[in-house]
């Protein structure tokens, strides 16, 4: 089965074509991602209307490029590609998967309505996919990933969400905790803005943290020892803001030390709570997903703490290119949870929840 997957929940426009074998093995035939993050870097954050306009501009070229690449062909100029695309498109996929939420309404609508149009025109099945669950399913795209990782604890750390899930089978999970205020990525992006780092700030904070020399600055870790599996990151932002205000003008060294302290605070909380969840739910597997899971320090700290804890846990994270928003992960979720519905019943749902 060939799946054409579309992702447009925020500032990435992405289309991927995947082949799922009977054995459940998934092969990514093409994965194209266009990002408007440079535009948002100029404004220091995402302006939803701008993101939606960019989605509109990118959608057709990205779709055509993914189709051409999946057939092992180089895309000609956009006009010729568009004129020639009808038959190629129809023959390139058997079914469609599309992100229907959560996300920005304007951005989501572009992907959802494009996908519905393709389903209608070519009379192919279509399946709506929850973007957050798909972040965890990015792990299934790695060739070394086990076919049966259940039960597992899944930690989703993205720009808008931080959630812990207990998964018992494909699509079957219990939400066990999440952030009470800002998401981990959101806190990094907001603090990065105060540090005058480019948007999105997560990768920049990671780079600057590596340059820290003193490593003595420490911010608090709210809810670290609470009994539940909740997180809170808005206090970290306030604490960092106060510290930055107190310093006045920041030197490059200050930015490095603050980045280090912020990264440490976020990492320790995420790792501790995930290990506690694995212990409580007697899970031998932890999966990481979402943009923040690109962070090397977070990955390495997980490995280290798992080794130190002697909990005998298998720990997985997606390939770097599948950590931030991409359509391949949407296709992976659809491949393993295939439940198409009538295209007319699919609606963009910006507030889609996990509970
Ligand atoms: O999953 P994602 O691409 O988009 C959402 O669904 O929100 O995540 C984006 C988030 C941003 O907050 C970004 O700063 C963060 O992921 N991020 C990182 C890194 N790369 C991206 N955070 C820390 N370290 C990174 N290397
Ligand atoms: Zn995402």
Image (spheres, grey):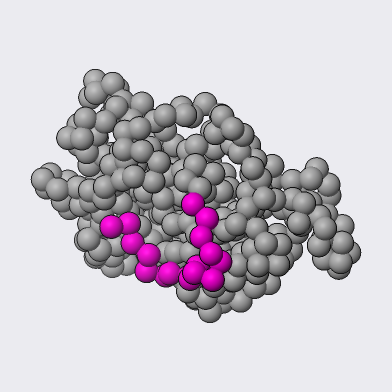
Q: Position of residue 29 (x, y in %)?
A: 69, 42
**In the picture, residue 55 is in which quadrant?**
bottom right
Q: Is residue 253 visible?
A: no
Decide which of 309, 258 is in the foreground and name it: 309
> Residue 293, located in which quarter of the rendered image?
top left
Q: Is residue 116 above or below residue 148?
A: below
Closer to the camera in the image, 46 or 197: 46
The percent position of residue 172, horizontal first and vertical second, equals 34, 45
Q: Residue at x 60, y 67 (%)?
A: 116
Q: Is residue 48 magenta?
A: no
Specify the principal SS of the magenta part. Answer: loop
Residue 334 drawn above or below residue 8: above
Q: Quadrant of the N terminus?
A: top right
The residue drawn where x is 39% and y is 30% is: 149
Question: Which picture quadrant has residue 288?
Answer: top left
Residue for point 22% across, 60% down: 180
Quadrant containing the C terminus in the rendered view? bottom left
The magenta stretch spans which residues? 339-355
Q: Position of residue 4 (x, y in %)?
A: 64, 53
């Amino acid at each position: 089965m060939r799946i054409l997957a579309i992702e447009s929940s925020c500032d990435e426009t992405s289309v991927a074509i995947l082949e799922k074998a009977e054995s459940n093995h998934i092969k990514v035939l093409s994965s194209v991602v266009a990002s408007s993050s440079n535009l948002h870097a100029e404004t220091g954050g995402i302006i939803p209307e701008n993101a939606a306009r960019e989605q509109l501009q990118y959608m057709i070229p990205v779709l055509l490029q993914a189709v051409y690449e999946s057939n092992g062909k180089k895309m000609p100029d956009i006009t010729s590609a568009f004129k020639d695309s009808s038959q190629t498109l129809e023959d390139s996929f058997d079914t469609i998967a599309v992100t229907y939420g959560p996300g920005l309404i304007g951005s989501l609508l572009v992907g959802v309505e494009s996908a519905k149009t393709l389903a209608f025109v070519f009379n192919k099945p279509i399946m709506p996919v929850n973007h957050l669950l798909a972040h965890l399913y990015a792990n299934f795209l790695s060739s070394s990933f086990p076919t049966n990782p259940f039960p597992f604890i899944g930690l989703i750390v993205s720009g808008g969400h931080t959630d812990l899930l207990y998964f018992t089978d494909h699509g079957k999970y219990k939400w066990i905790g999440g952030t009470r205020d800002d998401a981990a990525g959101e806190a990094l992006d907001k603090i990065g803005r105060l540090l005058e780092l480019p948007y999105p700030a997560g990768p920049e904070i990671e780079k600057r943290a590596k340059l820290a020399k003193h490593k003595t600055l420490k911010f608090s870790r709210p809810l670290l020892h609470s009994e539940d599996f909740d997180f809170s990151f808005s206090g970290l932002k306030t604490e960092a803001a106060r510290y930055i205000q107190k310093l006045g003008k920041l030197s490059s060294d200050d930015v490095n030390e603050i980045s280090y302290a912020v990264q440490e605070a976020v990492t320790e909380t995420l790792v501790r709570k995930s290990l506690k969840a694995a212990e409580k739910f007697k899970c031998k597997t932890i999966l990481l997903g979402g943009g923040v899971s690109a962070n090397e320090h977070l990955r390495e700290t997980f490995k280290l703490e798992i080794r130190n804890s002697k909990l005998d846990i298998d720990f997985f994270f997606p390939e770097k290119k599948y950590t931030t928003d991409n359509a391949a992960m949407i296709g992976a979720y659809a491949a393993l949870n295939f439940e198409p519905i009538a295209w007319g019943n699919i609606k963009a749902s910006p507030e889609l929840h996990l509970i």
